[in-house]
Image (cartoon, helix red, strand yellow):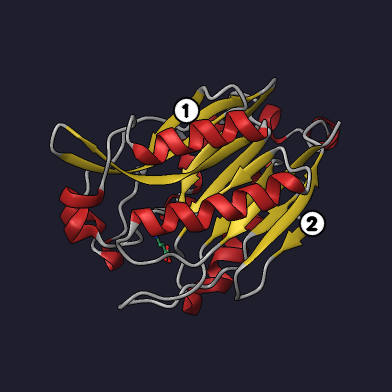
């Protein structure tokens, strides 16, 4: 059975959660009307990298963006995921969440590797927990942008049989080939589906590269966006992972005694 995925490759209004919520709401409705079951938004899609104003615009996990996602997920009978600026006890995190069609939060993952080139370490705390969760019956994981440069962290997420890796990003255009190649590599080396959403547009410091992508466990690109706003659609059969893991059993053949 396949899962219908929609990736909302959107531009983000810098530091304006209310406006971004309005924009995303329309796109989520459009994706749901196309029969999508899982809808993925970009990294920090309500705020962008307006990090110095997080005191003002970050929210708790019960905040207005979460309430909106819960009500949309329930009304449209879809799962919705993406990363949102989180505040807890005066500290700030870049936190990936997903809500299912019942409005239940499936996971919350705080970005583990902070990206110095975009000053994250000056404003944010890093997370210390894995991003594994279940999409219905399917074990998957969610990570954020720079995290994909750490294959050992991705592998840690895949050791429990996870079949899919969801990635959200604000990845700049000059490194878009890194983005594509890293994601295709993560899919091949972990024999999993990679479903990745990158924003488009620009802020004061960066132009972003889009090219949201869905890659199968053999490394084939099933769908890919361009440099402009669009919704990227794909159908993913998570059961396909099994045959590939039987054909080339890398998880059985690992030699952790040599490298862990
Ligand atoms: N938002 C990010 O983590 C960007 C990561 C990035 O651009 C990279 O090259 O890595």
Query: Image quadrant of residue 250?
Result: top right
Q: Which residue is mark 2?
A: 220
Q: Quadrant of the N terminus?
A: top right
Give the image quadrant in which the ligand numbered 1 is located: bottom left
Indicate which label's residue lies in the foreground, 2 or 1: 1
| Residue 52 picture quarter | bottom left
Mark 1, secondary structure of its residue: strand
Q: Taking 220 as reference, is 39 above or below it?
A: above
Label 1: few (<14), some (14–19) or many (≥20) C-alpha neighbours in 10 Å: some
Left or right of 65, for residue 224: right
Q: Which residue is mark 1?
A: 107
Let me know if residue 158 appears in the view: no
Q: Looking at the image, is 176 positioned above or below residue 79? A: below
| Residue depicted at x 23% and y 58% | 51
Residue 259: horizontal and vertical position, in percent?
Answer: 48, 37
What is the x, y in percent for residue 18? Answer: 36, 54
| Residue nearer the viewer, 253 or 166 | 166
**Disc assigned to residue 221:** none
Q: Is residue 227 left or right of residue 243?
A: left
In the image, residue 68 lies at what x, y percent?
A: 46, 38
Q: If the image is split into quadrants, where does the C terminus sit?
A: top left
């Amino acid at each position: 059975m396949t899962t219908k995925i929609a990736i909302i490759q959107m531009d983000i209004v810098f530091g304006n959660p209310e406006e971004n919520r309005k924009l995303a709401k329309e796109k989520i409705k459009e994706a749901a009307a196309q029969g999508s079951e899982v809808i993925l938004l970009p990294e920090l899609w309500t705020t962008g990298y307006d990090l110095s104003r997080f005191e003002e615009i970050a929210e708790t996990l019960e905040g207005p963006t979460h309430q909106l996602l819960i009500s949309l997920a329930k009304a449209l009978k879809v799962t919705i995921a993406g990363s949102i600026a989180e505040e807890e006890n005066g500290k700030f995190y870049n936190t990936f969440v997903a809500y299912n069609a019942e409005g239940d939060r499936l996971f919350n993952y705080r970005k583990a590797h902070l990206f110095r080139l975009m000053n994250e370490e000056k404003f944010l705390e890093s997370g210390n927990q894995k991003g594994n969760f279940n999409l219905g019956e399917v074990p998957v994981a969610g990570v954020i942008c720079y995290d994909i440069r750490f294959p050992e962290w991705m592998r840690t997420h895949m050791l429990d049989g996870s079949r899919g890796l969801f990635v959200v990003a604000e990845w700049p255009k000059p490194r878009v080939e890194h983005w594509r190649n890293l994601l295709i590599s993560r899919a091949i080396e972990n024999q999993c589906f990679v479903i990745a959403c990158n924003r488009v547009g620009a802020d004061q410091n960066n132009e972003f590269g889009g090219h949201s992508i869905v890659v199968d466990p053999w490394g084939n690109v099933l769908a890919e966006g361009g440099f402009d706003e669009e919704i990227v659609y794909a159908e993913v059969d998570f059961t396909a992972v099994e045959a590939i893991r039987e054909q080339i059993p890398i998880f059985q053949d690992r030699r952790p005694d040599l490298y862990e």
